[in-house]
Every structure is written in structure tokens, then in C-alpha cells.
Amino acid sequence: MQTEKKDIRALTKEQLRDFFTANGDKAFRGNQVYEWLWQKRAHSFEDMTNVSKETRAMLEANFVINHIKVDTMQRSSDGTVKNAVRLHDDLIVESVLIPTETRTTACVSSQVGCSLDCNFCATATLKRMRNLNPDEIYDQVAAIDNESRLYHGHPLSNIVFMGMGEPLMNYPNVMKAIEKITSPEGLGMSPKRITVSTSGISKMIKKMADDEVKFKLAVSLHSAVEEIRNEIMPFTKNFPLTDLREALEYWYKKTKSKVTYEYVVWRGINDDKRSIDALVKFCKYVPCKVNLIEYNPIDDGMFQQASEQAVQNYITALEHHNIIVKVRRSRGKDIDAACGQLANKS
């Protein structure tokens, strides 16, 4: 019975070097192959043109490269690009390229589906099938970097983990992917240009602080009133605001890095003075900024974008208390390309 070949990108550089010495070749061959896999983004062993045919045949006999495929790509009139990404086991995730005048941002997925149950989120209607591997996360970023160069004339400048899935529920693989993305042997991006967005997994926020990560943290908050938060994001009953506050205070104490709160204002849910006052109070615990996000309704149900006046009431209150606030308008509406937590159904 034939054993399934291992994905070569699961090997470290040292393991690759060991493989070649064990097979009678020079250790430096492992360095060459490693460079092809990550920095040069080879999709197949045939791409490795400075490696002999015999060596490529040996690699083919022992390994596979489970590279993602961009199954369909949609381009919006505003320059946004949405990728439906097919994985080696035929599962699909989504990633999005979001351009502005000064930069391009990749919004990437970390899981197939999601294990959380946020009622406003399209991805939450899909059960979590599995975690993405580090190379699958890396490939999404590399594909969007290529699209940024092709369509906008410059490399990718920022990455947000706001696509499908909860990144902190796939922490080891997300960390390994970021290590590769930021390595000079990978994409060489600055960790300060990467933001990991969580729905508020308190103990993992503390772990990130202990691990002394250099990337930025965003929290999908959406309400600082406990019962409202529990209603729209039922899983948060296990992660109360008191725990989240403590974790964020710990985060800031260890990292001195501001927190970004992602916050949607919905009509009849959190568009009242009580909700505004609660957010202002929560923002005073640690240095932060607030992104008020325009919502793409999933259907005609309870979650509908609040009025412009309600959003303005938030802005006025936050600015009055010297809290930085920005309004994030939805991008790629003509191709349905909001990032994962807030996306329409495909």
C-alpha cells in the first residue's frame, strides 16, 4: 500500500538539509530547495531550475507541494480583489485585496469555516471544517502580493487576519505563518504591518503578550454592554468583558501596543446612548483606537446598518473623550468582498 506523500513545506530548513545528507547529497541543497519553496514561491518541483533533474525527481518521489489555487478571482470597480481559494483537499476559503491610495491590504483566512457563533457573520453559518496550515495562510498572502504588484504597481503593504475563522483558535499555525511572512527567507514583511483580529479569546490574548509578538492586535468588540454582546456573539458568555478587559490591560502592559476595536453599529441593537457610553468607558482601560465598520447585511433580518446620525453620535462621543475613531466603509460591494466576519453570504 502506497503511503501518502508528505507536504515538503511542513519541513524546516534543517530537516530539508538532513533529508539531502541522508540521501547522499550536500546539505546546501536543502537551502536551495527551501528558498524555492518560500522566497521564490515555487508551485512545483519543476519550477526549481537550478536543481538537477535527478534531484527534482527524488523530491517528486518523496514529497508534494500542496499549493493553494485561486479558483475564482473577482475584481471590483473600486480595485478590490476577492479570491476564492481552493485548498489541496478541495475545501474553499476566501481572501481579499483591499486597495487605498497609499497602500494595499490583504485580508486572509485562518480556518475553513469558523467554530464561533456570531449571529451577524456569514462565516459563522459554515461549520469549522479544519484549521489552515501555515503554508496555506502564507500562500494567500503571496497570491495577494502578486495581485498588488500586477494591478496596483507595488508590493502588498499590510495584512489583516480578518477573513474566515478565529485566528486565535488556530494560534500555532497562524504564528508559524507570520514567522514565514516576516522572515527575510520568506516575504520579508514587517510584523508592524500585520494585524491579528480576534473576537475576544482572553487567555490567548495573554499568551500573545507572553510570546512578545510584534504584530498589532484588533478586537471585534461590537458592544461593551455584556448582555448585548452575549446576544450577538453567544460564545462570549465564556469570555466576559471583565476577562477581556484584564487580558487587554495585560497585553498593553507587556507590549505597549495600542489595541484597535472593530465595531459595527446596528439599528436597534447598539445605536443608543447606553451603548455609546459603555464603549467610551471600555476604551479608557487601555490606549486604543476604534474602527466603526459599515455593515453588509446578510439578509433582511435583525442586523441592519444603523443610521448615519447614530454613527455620528458615536464619533462625537469618542472624539470628545480624545479617542481616535475612523469609519471604515465597505469595499468591493459589487463583488461582495467584505472581510470574513462581516461578509455577505457568497
Image (cartoon, helix red, strand yellow):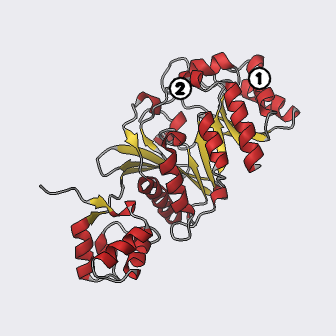
Q: Which residue is mark 2?
A: 120
Identity of the residue drawn at 71% across and 43% down: 251
Along the horizontal axis of the image, is 41 left or right of 235?
left
Along the horizontal axis of the image, is 76 left or right of 248?
left
Q: Position of residue 70 (x, y in %)?
A: 37, 54
> Neighbour class for label 1 at 10 Å: few (<14), some, many (≥20)?
some
Q: Quadrant of residue 12?
A: bottom left
Identity of the residue drawn at 42% across and 28% down: 125
Three-letter code, disc 1: Ala
Q: Which residue is mark 1?
A: 278
The number of numbered discs placed on residues in the rendered structure image is 2
Q: Position of residue 28 (x, y in %)?
A: 41, 81
**Between tags 2 and 1, which lies in front?**
1
Residue extending farthest to the front is 22
Please, what secondary structure does the residue beneath circle 1 have? helix
Three-letter code, disc 2: Phe
Q: Earlier in the sequence, mark 2 or mark 1?
A: 2
Q: Position of residue 265 (x, y in %)?
A: 66, 26
Identity of the residue drawn at 53% across and 44% down: 332
Residue in the foreground of this view, choosing between 240 and 297: 240
Q: Position of residue 267 (x, y in %)?
A: 64, 20
Q: Quadrant of residue 65?
A: bottom left
Residue in the foreground of this view, choosing between 174 and 212: 212
Q: Compute the Cα span from label 2 to label 1.
A: 20 Å
